[in-house]
Image: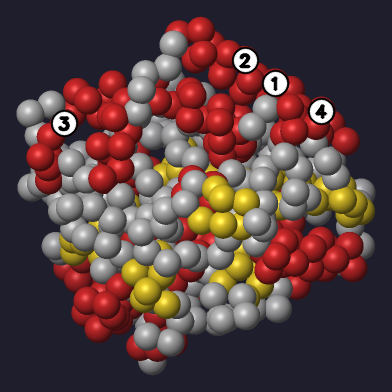
Amino acid sequence: MATALIHSDATELAELIRTRKISSVEVVQAHLDRIEATNPRVNAIVTLAEGALDAAKAADAELAAGVPVGPLHGVPFTVKDGFDTAGVLTQRGSPVFAGRVPSTDATAVARLKRAGAILLAKTNLPEFSYWVESDNLLTGRTNNPWDLNRSSGGSSGGESAAIAAGMSPLGLGSDLSISVRGPAADTGIAALKPTHGRIPMTGFWPRAPRRDWHAGPMARTVRDVALAYSLVAGPDGIDGFSVLPPEYDTGLGVSPDRSVRVGWLVDSGLGPVDPEVAATVRNAADALQGSGLAVEAVDIPALDRDNPLDLFSRQHIMEMKPAVQETTAGHEDEMFTYSKTLLATPDRSVEDYVLAEQGVERLRDGFAEYFHEHDVLLLPVTTIPAHEHALGDFVLDGRTVGPFHVSSTTVPFSLTGLPALSMRFGTTSDGMPIGVQLVAAWYAESTILHIASLLERLSPVRNQYPAL
């Protein structure tokens, strides 16, 4: 019974609880037991939320009393430790914030609770949510549940590892350049980075650079991602980037009246890609074409003209670096490697910053042109599958690239704010998950979720779990 519960998705658990076939207490206890059994090896969970079992008992009592309930009533969820959680440690992966307990929930956390979900735990991250691996001085390094010698990604790597390992059915992560999509690909789950501003970032730190930070749901199934997104999207009256109602959607919906136009690429100006990753994208394109969609290989000139990874580096250093400097002043001996690297990076000139901003504007124009002719873009999530810990420079297709190269295929959509979804569609020769990324036009979440649901049904690797 416990194994079935930890492998069930949140949508199924909610239905089982609502129909009283199982209790919320049973579900929460099964996940607590799973955490106790597996977290010492994975280190995805950094703080348990006190009172989860009491909340589950209250959820069961409400059902017994016939009280109307929300769509996630009694279902546990986890949250990346960059989001504030009322009464529960939120330490942001840094000794600078050790012992910090906020008094209020982040907007997205509060909305999941209002839907009936029960906060189970907080999950690990890099210091300040800033790196491609989840490691820090305060709560240590998270391991990939598929291979403990490899990374679960960053910065929502604790969240992805917890969900993949069955410690949580549903979670909330943040994304600056790769941070829900990359970890999802590394651990074989699904994650959505919606259009910028769709989900308020109120109660998350750091906020700079605000134009690039996104919140996104993470889960083992696309339908869970879609459900969670529907519950947390929409303005909160605080985040000035979150202004459109959640029902506003420019997509095709779940039943398009014409063939969906899909373009795919693996090598358009984004640098080298691992051959197994490239092959998985091609397989996904073939599967979509076989299902009746209009699919073609494409080239996006904007990606050849401006290097998104370079633009991101030039832009965000001018905005994030001052925030880190202010926060860590007087705590320099408590900083981890990556924050030290950021602060040691030379400042850019204002002129260079402006040129980078103009490059991002050209990228937006290029994608606007692309999505005028296509509905979806299919491409790799990460340029390589889950890598070993402490990634440095590495050689790919005969070229030496830096560790941030893993994000060269995700950064364009953080810079431009386009919605992008990561999901598994393949497996490496040594058994690690491989993901593909689906991108749609601004505010076209219905399109991306519809195609992801279709691709999930076509996937050759459904219902696989790490052997922990």
State how far apart marks 4 and 1 are (Cα).
11 Å
Q: Which residue is mark 1?
A: 362
Q: Which residue is mark 2?
A: 358
The tag on residue 369 is: 4
Secondary structure at numbered mark 2 = helix
First in sequence: mark 4 vs mark 3: 3
Question: What percent of the width, then of the height, locates residue 140?
Answer: 21, 60
* Mark 4 or 3: the one toward you: 3
- The disc labelled 2 sits on which kind of residue? Gln
Toward the viewer: 396 or 41?
396
Q: Are marks 4 and 2 in contact (CB under 8 Å)?
A: no
State how far apart marks 4 and 3 are (Cα).
42 Å
State how far apart marks 3 and 2 are (Cα).
31 Å
Secondary structure at numbered mark 4 = helix
Is the residue marked by circle 3 packed among few (<14), some (14-19), or many (20+) residues within 10 Å? some
First in sequence: mark 3 vs mark 2: 3
Relative to 283, residue 381 above or below: above
